[in-house]
């Protein structure tokens, strides 16, 4: 039986859109990776320019502005992407533990790993490039606190927190603040830092008992 013309047209159009979507996704990933490379290379000496990012990506200005209205929009996407990757990594590490205490320590270790050596240099450069990001937005720059805090709610509840959501947010904000201090001082977090932050998080979780 011959396929109806409208169904055939729709199927071909969908195939074309799917191919275009894959191409666009590759363009976005290329731009994100290129931006991180440029920012890391420049460090805190100068902020990355769109021209530098486009040149590094091997794409065109048209490709850049097809996906991002400005460099700030790109930086916001980098922060969101990095947070999602970090959350997945931390969750994977936490799943190796069977006790809430062990899960909280793994969480701290995962978050603070962003301040270590080569990773720290890239994280610091991206954060420094936030610059004017959020100046025209009441919400301000995107924060990794909420996605990371969500991983603490279950272990905090097990540890006796009367308000796991609030306490997890408190612990996440405090830990990310300490991470930021290490990044800007260019000091990698050490075992003593991990121990003290973990102890703080466990005390926060147990405060509602």
Image (cartoon, rainbow, N blue to C red):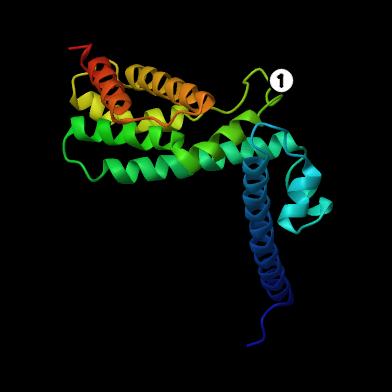
**What percent of the width, then of the height, locates residue 160?**
18, 19
Q: Residue at x 70, y 76 (%)?
A: 8
The quarter of the rendered structure image containing the N terminus is bottom right
**What percent of the width, then of the height, locates residue 171?**
35, 20
Q: Residue at x 27, y 15 (%)?
A: 204
From this viewpoint, which residue is outermost toward the bottom?
1
The image shows a total of numbered marks equal to 1
Q: Nearer the viewer, residue 23 or 18?
A: 23
| In the image, residue 92 above or below residue 43 | below
User: In what element is the residue under mark 1?
Assistant: loop
**What percent of the width, then of the height, locates residue 28?**
66, 52
| In the image, residue 58 above or below residue 115 | below
Q: Local crowd at mark 1 within 10 Å, few (<14), some, or many (≥20)?
A: few
**Residue 114 horizontal side relative to residue 28, left or right:** left
Q: Which residue is mark 1?
A: 135
The quarter of the rendered structure image containing the C terminus is top left
**Residue 46 horizontal side relative to residue 78, left or right:** right
**What percent of the width, then of the height, locates residue 189?**
38, 30
Q: Residue at x 26, y 44 (%)?
A: 95
| In the image, residue 180 above or below residue 18 | above
| In the image, residue 183 above or below residue 209 | below
């Amino acid at each position: 039986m011959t396929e109806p013309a409208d169904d055939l047209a729709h199927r071909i159009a969908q195939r074309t859109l799917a191919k275009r979507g894959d191409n666009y996704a590759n363009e976005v990933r290329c731009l994100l990776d290129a931006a991180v490379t440029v920012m890391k290379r420049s460090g805190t000496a100068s902020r990355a320019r769109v021209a530098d990012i486009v040149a590094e990506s091997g794409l065109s200005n048209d490709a850049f502005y097809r996906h991002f209205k400005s460099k700030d929009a790109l930086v916001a996407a980098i922060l969101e992407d990095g947070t999602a990757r970090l959350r997945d990594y931390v969750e994977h590490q936490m799943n190796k533990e069977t006790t809430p205490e062990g899960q909280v320590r793994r969480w701290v270790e995962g978050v603070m790993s962003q301040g270590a050596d080569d990773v720290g240099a890239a994280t610091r450069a991206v954060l420094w490039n936030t610059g004017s990001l959020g100046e025209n937005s009441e919400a301000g720059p995107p924060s990794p606190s909420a996605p990371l805090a969500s991983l603490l709610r279950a272990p905090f509840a097990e540890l006796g927190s009367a308000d796991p959501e609030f306490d997890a947010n408190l612990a996440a904000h405090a830990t990310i603040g300490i991470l930021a201090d290490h990044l800007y001082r260019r000091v990698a977090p050490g075992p003593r830092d991990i121990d003290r932050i973990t102890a703080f998080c466990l005390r926060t979780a147990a405060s509602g008992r």
